[in-house]
Each structure stands twice: as structure tokens, then as C-alpha cells.
Image (spheres, grey):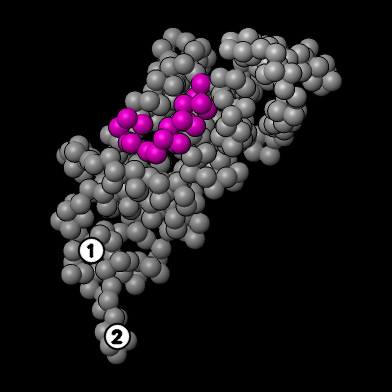
Amino acid sequence: DLARRDLTINAMAQDENGHVIDPFAGQQDLHDKIIRHVSAASFRQDPIRLLRTARFAARYHGIGFSIASSTLQLMTTMVDEGDLDKWVAERVWAEFAKALAGQNTAIFIQVLQDCGALSKIMPEVSKLFGVPQSASSHPEIDTGIHSLLVLSQAEKLSANIDVRFAALLHDLGKGSTPPEHWPKHPGHEARGVQLVKAACNRLKPPNQCIELAQLAASFHTHVHRLFQLTAEDVLSLLEQSDAFRRRDRFEAFLLVCKADSRGRYGYEDERYPQQSALLNWLIHLEQHDYSDIYLKLSGLDIKQHIHQRRLSGIEALIAQHGMA
């Protein structure tokens, strides 16, 4: 039974007298903080063990555990020889969800990237590694590293796996930027939405994860440029993100934007006034009295007049804020 276990630290037993049965030196690996496979044959019986090992590496990273080089090599061999080619979305997502709900999820993603598994499961994320960004705004330069930094910042801001998942996927469009445009990424937002859809069609996360990831990919740069937007642009952002009807999701979206801003070397503790400004403006607009419009008008006229009143409200708020 112990020989069929995945990792040596999980391949120990104890008899009725308290004697530890440890045929694969699991106690020594516990002492040395090493995550090691029991045997190649048992490990390869279930390819999901590869993701489970990556999740263990993330879970215990904070207390010094790391994957044995021989185990990482085995994981790479499994990918190269096609062990992951027929993975089941529901089982893979279950491991992803557990990793996202834990700590150091960036380690989980990095391990999958190091062994090649990420290119099989989420090639859209894998392609971000090695893609440069402008050093003036992204000192970390590499888009893959930036995505991991954003993911780590999202962990600090929210325990919600929707927020963390969207943080990981927010810049997918940069992976499809033609190299001749590097380090700039014009139009990466629209391309990113399509890549989020492709990734989610394959991985099959819950709808709330899909919706927030698409929202973040599409509009994160709008929020970053909030104080350069016109009143019409601000209202368009609020309307297209459905902020008036789904404030909880909009607040989660702003957390992703904040994580994106802070997910850069040297910006980890940077203020993000866009978040509070947009929330305050949204609350202010929600408090407007629109009863006279509903009493006097009908159909599209109601929508148009509410839009105009909200626009006037935003213009006033922008003037108070001192924006250009």
C-alpha cells in the first residue's frame, strides 16, 4: 500500500504500538523538507499527482519545503512523454482551485511552468514567460514574472479565488503581441478577452471565475488611466462592467486592478486611488433619485435620461476631484 503512494512524506504508517513504518525514508525527507516521489511507477499511475506535487510545493513553501530535483525531472519526463495529454478538466480544475485557495499560488504556477505542464494545461499563461514589457513601467520586464507578482498581490488583497484567478489571467493578450511591437502591447486587452475564453473553455472553472477574468482582461487599463478619462469614458466603464447591478463583482474587479498595479518590482506598497475614487463615484451615482424619470418616461427614454443624469453626475465629481 505504501509503495503505491505518491510522495515519501505520505508513504508512512504506524502500528498499534506506535512504531513508524517508513520504507521510503519519508521521515528523513520531512526533516530535510524535501518533496520526493516514492517511485516513478507509482507516481505515473495518476498524472494528476504532478499537479498535487506542485500544490504541495506551494503549500509548504513558507516553511522551506522544495521539490527534489529527481522528482521535478520525472514530472518533466511525464509531460514530454504525453502523460498529461488526456487530462480531465474537472480534476485539473479541482487542483487549481485548491492551489488558488491556499498560499503561494505563484509557486504552484512556476512549478508547472518549470516542468512544462503549464504549456499543456494553460498555454496562454505559459506563453507570457519571456515576453518583455517596457522597463519604465514594468521593472520586472518579463510578462510571466509580472503575472506571478500580480497573483501574489491578489493573495494579499483577497481570499476569493475569483480575484486570484483573474489576476493570473489579466494580461493574457500580451502573449499574442507580435514581437515587432515589443515591449509595447497595443490592443492586448481585446486579445486577452478571447484568450481568457479559450483558457476557460479548456479548464472549465466556475462562471464567476470566467466573468471576472474577462472583465479584468478587458478593462484593467481603463481603471489605471481613470484620472485621464472623460466623464463619458468613466460612465462607459461603469456601464460595460455592469457596476450598477453587480457592485460586488465590480469591487472584486477593482481588487484585481490594484493587484496589477502593485504586481511590479518597487510598487508593492503603492497607493491605488483609482479604487476608492471609482467606488465613491459609484455609490454617489446610486444615491441619485431617478423616480421622476420612471414616472414621466418609458422604454428607451428611461435608459437615455438615466444615462444623461449619471453623466452629469460624473462630470461634477470629476470637477470636484480636479481631473483634467
Residue sitting farthest toward the front: 295
Q: Position of residue 271 (x, y in %)?
A: 72, 34
What type of secondary structure mainly makes up the magenta span?
helix
Front residue of 32/216: it is: 216
Amino acid under label 1?
A: Arg
Q: Is residue 152 magenta?
A: no
Q: Residues within 10 Å of mark 1 (few under 14, many from 20)?
A: some
Q: Quadrant of residue 79?
A: top left
Front residue of 118/138: it is: 118
- Tell me if residue 310 can be seen: no
Circle 1/circle 2 CB separation < 8 Å? no
Is residue 118 depicted above or below 63 in this figure?
above
Residue at 81% across, 17% down:
316
Looking at the rendering, the stretch of residues picked out in magenta corresponds to 200-218
Q: Position of residue 283 (x, y in %)?
A: 72, 31
Badge 2 element: loop
Q: Position of residue 189 (x, y in %)?
A: 49, 18
Q: How much space separates mark 1 and mark 2, taking CA atoms?
A: 19 Å
Residue at 29% across, 43% down:
90
Report the residue marked by disc 2. 19
Report the residue marked by disc 1. 5
Q: Is residue 211 magenta?
A: yes
Amino acid under label 2?
A: His
Residue 39 shown left or right of residue 55 in the figure: left
Residue sitting farthest toward the bottom: 17
